[in-house]
Amino acid sequence: MNSKKIIGIIALIRPPNLLIVFLTISAAAVLAGATIDDWILVSLASLAGAVIGGGGNAINDFFDAEIDAINRPNRPLPRGDVTKQEAWWVWRLASSAGVLLSAYVGPLPFAIALFWIVSLYFYSRVLKRKVLIGNLAVGVVTALAFVYGALSVGGFEHSLIPAFFAFLVNLARELVKDVQDIEGDRRGGARTLPVVYGVKPALGLATLVIVLLIMSTVVPYANGTYNVHYLVLVGVADLALTYVAVSLWRSRLPHRLERLSLVLKFTMVLGLAAIYIGS
């Protein structure tokens, strides 16, 4: 295997996204009461989630090869660095490894891991091409990372608030990405919200979700769940979210929307830090 192939496979699984998954699961476990004695279990759970996520990215690119040739020609498959068969095997191997690791963590994390694998497969093959269903699926799958991390060491009650926030921010981000990808999705026959109903309804829904998210972030401080340190950091995240909500209506150029999508990803990391520090 040459270096170009190795680099292509690494790009296929999207390492920055996997790092976020790993940190999310680890943080959820700590919020649920994990101690230093649980570090092996937490590490295995976090690694399992990240590996499954990498497999999900591979199978997504497998089914999106033709659309990505239009929307993202620099991805490994359209560029020719990785073949579809190789992407298929990356998914199979990563999913198998992830589910085996999850089996060691516990029965409930194992069940969530199986749900992830099945959901990511059908999302990539069918659901992402359906109006709103694919967007909601990504939100649920992402939110479950918090529940999964908490269940790896015990109860999941402390994971519900961050899971709700993760659902909303990823729902908004997926809607923005749908607008960004409208040309390739239209040519590929995908029936996403902007393809079927237009760009303005999609941006309107994304804005509504962001506003709901901003309003929701104040509640855990108001009811005493998180302290003032949370409020300070989440306030910065809310400013970034406000910037995205306003900017969505200023320009719909793909590179501009891609930047806003990255800002939304950043707010998730910042929100995670806020919850960790403020809890």
Image (cartoon, grey):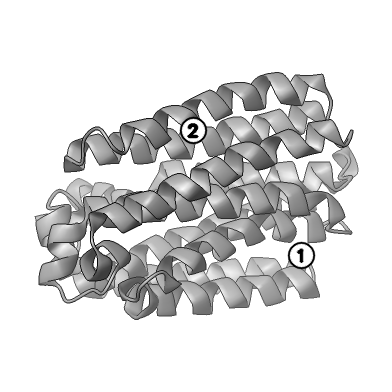
Q: Amino acid at mark 2?
A: Leu
Residue shown at 89% from the left, 43% from the top = 37
Residue where numbered disc 2 is placed: 241
User: From mark 2 to mark 1, how far is it between C-alphas?
Assistant: 35 Å
Locate residue 225 relative to residue 13 in the image: left or right. Answer: right
Does 155 appear above or below 251?
below
Residues 269 and 243: in front is 243
Estimate how packed mark 1 is, as few (under 14), some (14 to 19) or many (20 or more) residues with alpha carbons within 10 Å.
Answer: many
Task: Give percent across and percent down for residue 160.
Answer: 76, 54
Residue where numbered disc 1 is placed: 105
Residue 83 is drawn in which quadrant? bottom left
Q: Does residue 40 appear in this view?
A: no
Residue 58 is drawn in which quadrant? bottom left
Residue shown at 85% from the left, 48% from the top = 32
Question: In which quadrant of the rendered image does the C terminus lie?
Answer: top right
Does 74 appear above or below 66?
above
Locate residue 11 relative to residue 28 in the image: left or right. Answer: left
